[in-house]
Amino acid sequence: MITRILLIISIIATFIGCSTTEPTTQPEPTAPSEKQPEVVEEPIDFSTMLEPPKGWHHWNEQDTQFRGISSKNAYETVLSNKSPQKEVVVAVIDGGVDPEHEDLDDVMWTNEDEVPANGKDDDGNGYIDDVNGWNFIGGSDGKNVNHDTFELTRIYRDLHQRFANVDTTTLNKQAREKYVYYKEIRSDYEAEVNQLNQQYKNIESLNQSMQEAQNILDNHFADSSYSYEDIQNLQPTSQELNFAKNVMSYILENDIDSTLITDQKKQIYEFAKYGYNPDFSPRDIVGDNYEDKTERYYGNHDVAGPDPSHGTHVAGIIAAERDNGIGVNGVATNTRIMAIRAVPNGDERDKDVANAVRYAVDNGADIINMSFGKSYSPHKEVVNKAIAYADENDVLMVHGAGNSAENSDKKPSYPTDKYENGGSANLWLSVGATAWKPDENFVAQFSNYGNETVDLFAPGVDIYSTMPGNEYKFQEGTSMASPVVAGSAALIMAYYPHLSTQQIRQIIMENTTRYADQEVILPNEGNPEASETVQFSELSVSDGVVNVYKALQAAEELSNR
């Protein structure tokens, strides 16, 4: 599932309902800028910033105080007198990519052996008109899956049909074990549905509180033109005014408005209508035999699909055209984006993920970015075989660790690099997300973590990148952190193609920016009262954040040996 509900709304009811203490006065928030500043000598008060500068993830902490990956410094120093030696292909397995975006159209991978739109499989690879990639969740008639159910719902539906009314006294040992599993799944499913209902109630409460606060402040200031600074300077003389100040301060500091509330209501509605609806099934659109997990040749060539927002944002982070005077700069240069559509608005299916990985490998991808994940993988063995295939063919796989604020060592976010036999893929990087405030909030509060299963972290909060229709937008998630690492790997490959993929992975892991001793709030989004502080070193294998400048320096040194 690639969509993340903004869980600040889940906790807001408590904050709004009982806050009667007068808040501390804060200075006016700092506005974001678009260009990297020169060396910043005075300490930045990050607490006053509501939004970071665009492109902060490229910056160098030493000069700017923003904990980026130092890619800007890398281009200006290590790579300043060098030329890329290889064109790198990064497969973006996602919900779709807009191939006509002004910042992506010149970096899209092109299958030169395929004649566009002639209805033939010119290169004989089994996929007709796959010019920029392939779509495994579309039909041969051109129709596409947009929404799909969550994997939990699919498992619950299948088991419920079998066990809902079963006479348990007639079950054999194997069936009884399956029945016990059904009860666990049913409990998980019902808990998710109940949580969704609660989130809707919280949003309704938030909307009501926001309207009440606006009315109170409008009356107090005699109009609606008051500013954030006006609110902070307000000295409440009543509980009602104090309530309004607390509410509107929080609203403004978190960029909450009626549009966001409407969007969240829409998302919850879609989750209820599609994601958690056992009666919904769009698979007939694809037209494959879903029970046949060996089937590979189905789908269509529409790599954008009905909603390419997520994948377009991911692709831009990796390789948006650099220094073209518009939009944003991707991390990597001399890199092509192979778009593979396999992730709907809902949970991706194991069969499609496996086929997407195989397509990427067979058609020349050097790196596969996977900004998706789910809590259940009923056909994990199918995906594992594809991952092993990529591993054997020297393809680096980069996966977002997940947005559930959970310990991946205990609760995996699939796919993973772990095989059923106890082995694991060698060419795999699992990426957690960091934020732009270098304090105890440094780790994104939605990010999964794991001292054994999350390899490293990368910037993943308020990342500015491409959106469909030549638009640009801030987004957040480990979905944004993963392409930062994929782009870093692509950049190293482009300039040092003689290094093996394993060497590049090792270079990235050994040359992170380490914050081992920093105390950070353990991700626990949705329950701030239960938050605890841990050392950053406890959250990943490398104890650090990707630093492409240091990695390129190491690649240069290794090349000169």
Image (cartoon, rainbow, N blue to C red):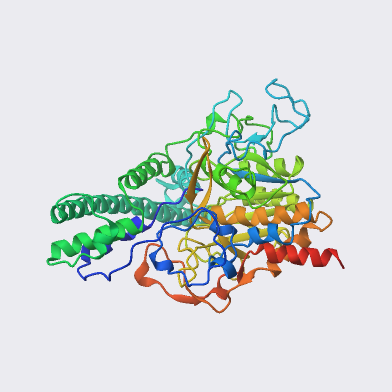
**Residue 545 image position (x, y, % from top left):** 60, 66
| 229, 457: nearer the viewer | 229
Figure quadrant of residue 113? top right
Q: Residue farthest to the bottom?
A: 517
| 286, 548: nearer the viewer | 548
Residue 454 appears in the picture as rendered: no
Left or right side of 461 for 81: right
Left or right side of 499 for 195: left
| 451, 559: nearer the viewer | 559
| 158, 196: nearer the viewer | 196
Residue 151 appears in the picture as rendered: yes
In the figure, 553 relative to 310: above or below?
below
Q: Quadrant of the C terminus?
A: bottom right
Give me the residue at 46% from left, 60% from top: 446
Tally of marks: 0
**Residue 350 image position (x, y, % from top left):** 60, 45
**Residue 10 image position (x, y, % from top left):** 34, 57
**Residue 240 image position (x, y, % from top left):** 14, 62
In the figure, 6 relative to 45: above or below?
above
